Image (cartoon, coloured by chain):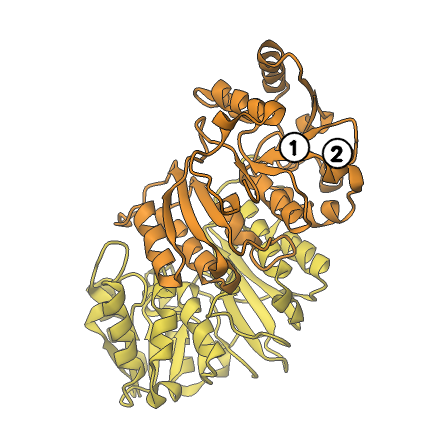
Chain colours: A yellow, B orange
Amino acid sequence: MRIGIVAPSTPILPATAERVTALAAERFADVELVFHPQCFLSHRHFAGEDRVRAAAFAEVADDPGFDALWFARGGYGSCRIAEDVIAGLGPAARDKTYLGYSDAGYILAGLYRAGFPHLAHGPMPNDLKREGGSAAVERALAWLTRRDPAALEPGLGSAPAAAFNVTVFSQLLGTALEPDLGGHVLMLEDVSEHMYRTDRALFHITGNTAVRDLAGIRLGRCSEVPENDPDFGASEEEIFRYWCDRAGIPYLGRADIGHDAANKVVPFGAA
Amino acid sequence: MRIGIVAPSTPILPATAERVTALAAERFADVELVFHPQCFLSHRHFAGEDRVRAAAFAEVADDPGFDALWFARGGYGSCRIAEDVIAGLGPAARDKTYLGYSDAGYILAGLYRAGFPHLAHGPMPNDLKREGGSAAVERALAWLTRRDPAALEPGLGSAPAAAFNVTVFSQLLGTALEPDLGGHVLMLEDVSEHMYRTDRALFHITGNTAVRDLAGIRLGRCSEVPENDPDFGASEEEIFRYWCDRAGIPYLGRADIGHDAANKVVPFGAA
């Protein structure tokens, strides 16, 4: 199995790529990882200019020699290229599996809207840098190579699912990337956001009429929350319950996803 | 003229209210300012619980003895009460003038959508605490009491206008508070946001189809921008030009609004 890796937002270090490659060679004999050189470029905030990141993504996505496209990491930047890149993809791109989360959500959303069948929210190569990160990378590879059920978010049920970062999902509503999630269980996680921002984003998300057709919302982890001054006085779970209740969306409990090494895989669509 | 002041998001200090009252008494003989006691309440993040803030807003808005409702300050919280409060307002509320900005934008947006005719984006009592803030408060009172043309944003033209904080406007898109701004010049300002967040919000705003009917966008000041690491490499004006160009929305230059003492008044709708 050949997995191509690109970085549509921010760059990773060559040393990280080497460690991920070594880990894959040791634990997954049948896998060849190909880090596109674009992963290591740096242009201002981004892993290369928009057109360079877009070209690298399309090159890997359209190459029938790759079975999967793995997002190298999150950060910020894929919303700048997503719409144009997706519109230009050929038939080989549709057969491929795509795995990533966080900022990768813009592209996953657009691909899902475009009917791509093999998409998942889950760990990325740069997660190796987290504490215990090798488990995250191994989980991603176990799912990519053999659809290991142990890699999956444990609460997946019969309803179709999708998973996103709270802020990313909020910021793609109403754009050409917004997928139709009617009847879906939507799992949401967030990182590095003040609690009042999470509250505000939930106002925005649950206040969007299209979102109200969800089968329900499940809450992943909200990590590295900056101090709120004064204390916000409500936990992320209280916030989610409050806004789901107001919007008439079932709140379905916690989800085992987040910006951490325990982040499980959530395939988009029916299980 | 009687002006009622409420705080639908976060509280102000009684000492600030006293200073604003003294300034008004000294410079505007015909004005009576009435700070609703709710302005000084504190409940977690907010100036009182949601129902308390909502009740204070409705009490002042529905009271025919007040000519204007002045938002005490921004912060966060008015999105939690806006939809319900507006739905319950009576006829006296419609005759009133409403002035505020920042978080007040949620309520101004919803009132504009509901057809309220006298709304404006401009300075608030708590701006007195800014350097040179008395000029901002005097400007607001000069506009509230005698529609002083010198208080107005100098670039107002024949097209109807509206003004919002970038983040606030982004987070109300698609909700029951989003106004129809077709044919409007939209002025946007922001504060305390990383440049990558402003870029992301502009993706969201200009990517919303309804927004693309604007006559154009003008850029207010983006102040207190936290350091971007690495440097974002584009100024707020470059960001605005980029996204307006992508969306086919005319970029109409700078606007004299922002989170500062120079913040001018922008009446919503036709000049």
Residue A140: where, in percent of width, then height? 40, 75
Position above or below: B121 against B21 = below
- Disc 1: host chain: B
Q: Quadrant of residue B71?
A: top right
Q: Secondary structure at mark 2?
A: helix
The disc at residue B19 is none
Check the image and name the residue furthest to the front.
B158
The residue positioned 56% from the left and 44% from the top of the image is: B270
Q: Earlier in the sequence, mark 2 or mark 1?
A: 1
Q: Quadrant of the C terminus of chain A?
A: bottom right
Q: In the rendered structure, are the residues bearing label 2 and label 1 in contact, judged by CB atoms less than 8 Å apart?
A: yes
- Left or right of B232? Residue A144 is right
Q: Are marks 2 and 1 on the same chain?
A: yes
Residue A177: where, in percent of width, then height? 46, 70
The residue positioned 72% from the left and 59% from the top of the image is: A245
- Disc 2: host chain: B
Q: Secondary structure at mark 1?
A: loop
Q: Quadrant of residue A160?
A: bottom right
Position above or below: B88 against A258 = above
- Left or right of B172? Residue B235 is left
Position above or below: B124 against B271 = above
Residue A247: where, in percent of width, then height? 70, 60
Task: From the image, tell me which residue sits under label 2.
Answer: B56
Residue B73: where, in percent of width, then height? 58, 31
Q: Quadrant of the N terminus of chain A?
A: bottom left
Q: Nearer the viewer, residue A88 or B213?
A: B213
The disc at residue B7 is 1
The residue positioned 48% from the left and 71% from the top of the image is: A264
- Crowding around mark 1 (Cα neighbors within 10 Å: few <14, some 14 to 19, many 20+) is many
Q: What amino acid does circle 2 point to? A: Ala
Q: Nearer the viewer, residue B264 or A108?
A: B264
